[in-house]
Structures are given as structure tokens and as C-alpha cells.
Image (cartoon, rainbow, N blue to C red):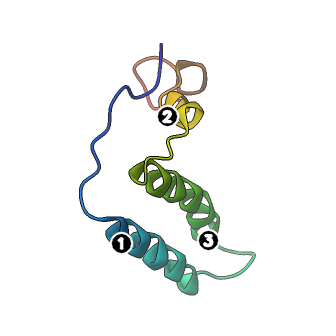
Amino acid sequence: MCGIRNVHFMGTSEDWKLLRYKTTKLKNFTVPNRDDFGSYIDGVLPIIDQFIQTYQDNVDNQFWNKVMDVEHVGRGGSGR
């Protein structure tokens, strides 16, 4: 079985919301249509959203079960 069985979030809900806000602001440093960093930020925001939801006791078990997935990552490596 893959996934993470247990997590402990530190900080406050406001800390996590601030992290999301600051991550969104990083897009100000991207070049539209020519910057992979912007795409990276777009990929990170839904993950931070899941962290916030989990912190607020709205756990998406499907998300957490896919955090570490042998099918997509492979065994003992970075998946590359």
C-alpha cells in the first residue's frame, strides 16, 4: 500500500493560507508563456490547497493515498 498514513501539521490555519498567498504572488516573477516556473506554481497551489483542507479536518484520502504511488514513482528512485 502506498500513501502517507499519518501527518502532523504545525502552524496555524492562517500560516497555511499565508503560504498559499505568498506562493500565488511568486507568479509575479514569471514570464507568461515562456516560463516553466509559472507552470510549477500552478501545480503547487492545488497541493497547498489540499494541505489547508487537511489542516481544517477536511481530509481527501484519495489525495493522501496518491502522495507516494509506486505506479507513478517507481521503486527506490525519483521516478525518472
The residue type indicated by label 1 comes to Glu
Quadrant location of residue 78? top left
Q: Which mark is residue 1?
A: none
Marks 2 and 3, how far apart in space? Answer: 24 Å
Q: Place residue 42 in its image quadrant.
A: bottom right
What residue sits right under mark 1 in the picture? 14
N-terminal label among 2 and 1: 1
Query: What is the three-letter code of the residue carrying label 2?
Result: Trp
x, y percentage for residue 52?
A: 45, 57
Residue 40 placed where, x, y %?
A: 58, 61
Few, some or many C-alpha atoms within 10 Å of disc 2 (few <14, some 14-19, many ≥20)?
A: some
Judged by depth in the image, the label closer to the viewer, 2 or 1, is: 1
The answer, for residue 80, to whether it is visible in the render is no
Quarter of the C terminus within the rendering: top right
Viewer-nearest of discs 2 and 3: 2
- Contact check, label 1 and label 3, Cβ < 8 Å: no
Q: Residue at x 43, y 47 (%)?
A: 57
Q: What is the secondary structure assignment of the residue under circle 3? A: helix
Q: Which mark identifies residue 38? A: 3
* First reached walking from the N terminus: tag 1 or tag 3: 1
Residue closer to the observer: 27 or 53: 53
Q: Which mark is residue 64?
A: 2
Cα distance between the residues tagged 1 and 3: 24 Å
* Element under disc 2: helix
Q: Secondary structure at mark 1?
A: helix
- Total labels drawn: 3
Q: Nearer the viewer, residue 2 or 60?
A: 60
Kindly identify the amino acid type of the residue bearing the numbered disc 3. Answer: Gly
Q: Nearer the viewer, mark 1 or mark 3?
A: 1
**The furthest residue to the right:** 33
The residue at 25%/62% (across/down) is 11
Image spot of residue 63 (x, y percent): 56, 37
